[in-house]
Image (cartoon, rainbow, N blue to C red):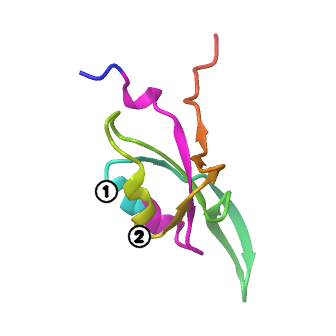
Amino acid sequence: MNAVTAPTLPWYVAHSKPRREEVAKEHLVRQGYAVYLPRLKVLKHLRRQVLRLEPMFPRYLFFRQGRADQSIAPVRSTHGVASIVAFGGYAMMRPPLRPLPR
């Protein structure tokens, strides 16, 4: 049994296709990934004022493996995902968050 559990796995950043953050999120969840898509309530002025939920970081969402042995390679071909954010050929990772001390 692998000692690494899902909550201790790092978070990765996916760059989505334009206005396809929600599509990418749905497909990643179906594949067993944990996904975080932070959103903000934004007041839009069209013909009337409308309050909408929009991504906090347009075209970006965060994901991590659902289990330790799950590869991130399928993410690149997921509907709605354009690429995985990488620097120098290495996928950008965010270490798991630690609980705040009490």
51 inside magenta stretch:
no
Q: Residue furthest right?
A: 45
Quarter of image, res 18: bottom right
Residue at 72% over, 84% down:
48
Q: Residue at x 54, y 45 (%)?
A: 12
Q: Residue at x 37, y 62 (%)?
A: 27
The answer for how far apart the CA atoms under marks 2 and 1 are is 11 Å
Picture disc at residue 73: none
* Amino acid type for the residue under numbered disc 2: His
Which quadrant: the C terminus? top right
Question: Which residue sits furthest top?
Answer: 102
* Residue 99 in picture, x, y percent from top left: 58, 20
What secondary structure is found at the residue carrying circle 1?
helix
Element under disc 2: loop
Circle 2 residues within 10 Å: few <14, some 14–19, many ≥20? some
Is 29 left, or right, of 50 in this rendering?
A: left
Q: Which part of the image, by quadrant, shows the N terminus?
A: top left
**Residue 69 image position (x, y, % from top left):** 31, 36
Please indicate whether residue 40 sits to the left or right of residue 15 in the image. Answer: right
Q: Which residues are magenta?
A: 4-25
Q: Relative to the observer, which residue lies in front, 51 or 84?
A: 84
In the depicted view, which residue is nearer to us: 87 or 80? 87
Q: Residues within 10 Å of mark 1 (few under 14, many from 20)?
A: few
Q: How many marks?
A: 2
Q: Position of residue 94 (x, y in %)?
A: 60, 37
Residue beneath disc 1 = 30
Q: Which residue is mark 2?
A: 79
